[in-house]
Image (cartoon, grey):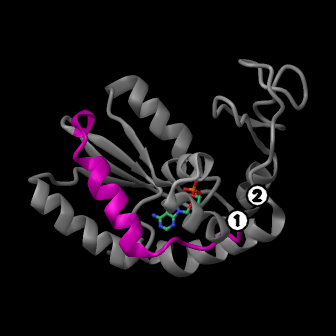
Amino acid sequence: MNLILLGPPGAGKGTQAKRLFADYQIPQISTGDILREAVRRGTPLGKQAKPIMDQGKLIPDDLMVGVVEERLQQPDCASGFVLDGFPRTIAQAEALESVLGKLGKRLDKVISLEVPEEKLIERISGRRNCPNDGTVYQVYQNPPKRAGFCDKCGGGLVQREDDKEEAVKERLKVYAAQTAPLKGC
Ligand code: AMP
């Protein structure tokens, strides 16, 4: 099963992708996670992406298409995948179509997650991450047992730079302008 999860930041794409993995064993391809890992490791992609991500803007299409094309060729994608955070522009969607054609794959479904904007802002502003193991908490709905610390590893939780107010406003603006139009395709 080859799926795309479409939706604004905070809509729950990551959460649903993890559930789909648990039920169907199809891997989540989160371009945001791939980029954050590249930033953490200090790769050339990470160095280029960090300042753009921190401002809530989009990484250039050609870079992202290359990342996804490579990832889709990994053996774990043979029986399916869930794209989370890609495509984010019309150009990315067109490129994906041709990449899938080249790889002899086709999409089964695009699932669009719709959440009111005030809920998105509430969710994102309450999101805290464990930089050690990547666990995501939500201070209102899914708080850690001890405030500010990861239940699994005990490490201190942080707020992603792009989950801060200014960057969130920009991400929602970018979503409305560049990603939401994909729903009409
Ligand atoms: P996410 O975790 O999906 O919200 O992504 C975090 C950030 O990574 C975004 O705000 C963008 O800066 C960047 N990013 C992730 N996926 C893409 C994409 N498909 N195209 C461009 N930038 C992306």
User: Does residue 184 show up?
Assistant: no
The residue wearing badge 2 is 161
Circles 1 and 2 in contact, beta carbons < 8 Å:
yes
| Dot 2: element | helix
Q: Main secondary structure of the magenta part?
A: helix
Quadrant containing the C terminus in the rendered view: bottom left
Of 158 and 136, the residue lying toward us: 158
- The mark that comes first in sequence, 1 or 2, is 1
Q: Would you say residue 138 is visible in this rendering?
A: yes
Quadrant observed for ligand 1 in the rendered image: bottom right
Taking the image as shown, residue 139 lies to the left or right of residue 81, namely right
Question: Toward the viewer: 132 or 33?
Answer: 132
Q: Is residue 4 magenta?
A: no
x 64%, y 29%: residue: 133
The answer to which quarter of the image holds residue 172 is bottom right
Where is residue 88 drawn, in percent x and y? Answer: 45, 68
Residue 164, disc: none
Give the residues drawn in magenta, as a range. 55-77
